[in-house]
Image (spheres, helix red, strand yellow):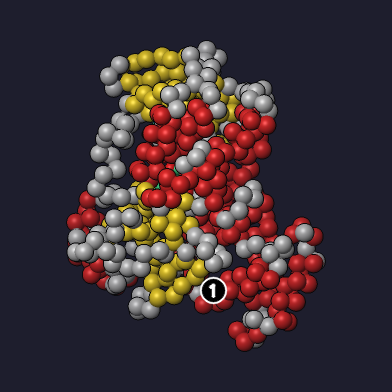
Amino acid sequence: MSDITIIGAGLVGSLQALYAAQAGLSVDVFERRPDLRAATLYQGRSINLALSDRGWKALSDVGLADAVREIAIPMYKRTMHDVSGPLRYQPYGDEGQAIYSVSRGALNRLLLEAADRTGKARFHFEWRCTSVDFKQKELHFDAVNSGQRTVRYDRLIGTDGAFSAIRQALMMNDRFDYHQFYIEHGYKELSIYPDEKGGFKMEKETLHIWPRKDFMLIALPNPDGSFTCTLFYPMQGEGSFESLDTDEKVLDFFQATFPDIVPLMPDLVQQWNTNPASSLVTVRCKPWNYMDEVLILGDAAHAVVPFYGQGMNAGFEDCSLLNAAWKEQGGSFEGLFSSYAAQRQPDGVAISELALRNFIEMRDKTADPMFLLQKKIEGRFAAAHPEKWQPLYSMVTFSHRPYREALRRGELQDGIMKQVMNRPDIEQVWDSEEVELAILNAWNQTPELH
Ligand SMILES: Cc1cc2nc3c(=O)[nH]c(=O)nc-3n(C[C@H](O)[C@H](O)[C@H](O)COP(=O)(O)OP(=O)(O)OC[C@H]3O[C@@H](n4cnc5c(N)ncnc54)[C@H](O)[C@@H]3O)c2cc1C
């Protein structure tokens, strides 16, 4: 029996396998899908993700940051596309700060290969975990080539995603809290293919957004010159994926709402009809462990909506925190899962809340000039007083501050900014010393921020 058994070889499971194997532990990983190194799972359409500091930290822990940098595209700013044509820009952070577009399949592959190379991790593909018996420490599988199988484990980590079988088993335990909900919006992915010369049809090193108040479209670049676009739109009702049920309605909708996209996507209608509309779920639960024997990480513990670009980053941070705690304990598992789970779980709730709020910011507020002015004032103050103030987006994306602290500080800072934005002459005096002093005074009167 291996030291650690992991269920799910997605992004988080593969990373956790690598951490454990590099620490000298033997690992067995069971994955319900075929080996993505052999399968065509991610070929054709590229699906990408925004990678930021919390994710990079974990990747450099396991020595993969340089390899990932080779396949990642920096995005230094948001580019907002108006219906009428003009573009507006908002930098993500200080000069040189960026979030990175990276292919989900390529990243997963790098992690799997690195874990494989250690010689300490064994992967079992097409093994679907169907149930767990915590008392007997037994896992039950439906395996494509081996039928129904039972496997014993010593320590079990569930990284089997938003609909986790391991979490499902934890739910049978006394006092397990569970809350799952869907938002009204779902998403559909569409591609803008490269031009005839293999070049990008829009600016490359930026995240494109078409904010349309109640919904939005975004696009992230891929190394092959294409962009992966994601439309976030209601699933049902008037003005929804369901209501766009003819080719004509789809084209009319795009022409009226995203006119600059239409010429870039000649096969729009075909893609629309081929690619599914998928739902967006949030999962909050606790405890994430069963004694010091079973633990869930990543989406299995905290599935969040994708609007902060943090789901994977949070899952990667789970792994780096768990492995740091294990090292601090001198490699002992005593109390590890229970103390890690208790400490980290409120951060899972916080990032799920931040992600829900950021949808409103992205789809609605990024089109509002007063909101962009607020961001400018905040950025200016933060640059002058970096020890006092970090904008919320930076705390979440470019720091390692616990999410719950970022959420709380962000709320307090927002309260201060609201007072400042209430000044009738703010558009004229936004860069004055007076405004800076007003923020400073309010900050001084907010001890929680000190
Ligand atoms: C549209 C969209 C955009 C996103 N964009 C971003 C982004 O920009 N940045 C970011 O950080 N995050 C983003 N995310 C979130 C990110 O995709 C997830 O947080 C991340 O994939 C979680 O990784 P995971 O390994 O925990 O789960 P998963 O990626 O879901 O992997 C779980 C694995 O477990 C396997 N599995 C499931 N059940 C079983 C079973 N019973 N037995 C065996 N194996 C099983 C699955 O096949 C899968 O391989 C986005 C999500 C969506 C939907």
Q: Residue at x 26, y 44 (%)?
A: 43
Mark 1: which amino acid?
Answer: Leu
**Residue 373 placed where, x, y %?**
57, 76
Q: Considering depth in this image, is 32 or 123 the residue closer to the camera?
A: 123
Above or below residue 210? Residue 168 is: above
Identify the residue at image location x=51%, y=29%: 22
Please say if 262 is above or below 68: below
- Report how many numbered discs are placed on residues in the image: 1
State which quadrant residue 286 falls in.
top right
Q: Position of residue 297 (x, y in %)?
A: 53, 35
Residue 15 vs 364, above or below: the answer is above
Q: Is residue 138 above or below residue 368?
A: above
Between 416 and 49, the one nearer to me in the picture: 49
Tell which of 238 and 446 is nearer to you.
446
Looking at the image, residue 33 sits to the left or right of residue 160; the answer is left
Q: Which residue is mark 1?
A: 372
Question: Residue 229: x and y, percent?
Answer: 33, 58
Question: In the rendered image, which quarter contains the C terminus?
Answer: bottom right
Q: Is residue 241 visible?
A: no
* Residue at horizontal 29 percent and vertical 43 percent from the top: 42
Front-most of 277 and 239?
277
Residue 224 position, x and y percent, is 29, 55
Ligand 1's quadrant: top left
Say few, some or many: other residues with alpha carbon within 10 Å of mark 1 (under 14 / 14 to 19 / 20 or more).
some
The answer to whether one can see residue 402 in this image is yes
Q: Is residue 23 left or right of residue 275?
A: right
**Tag 1's secondary structure?**
helix
Name the side, left or right, on which 347 lies relative to 15.
right
The residue that appears at 55% across and 73% down in the rendered structure is: 371
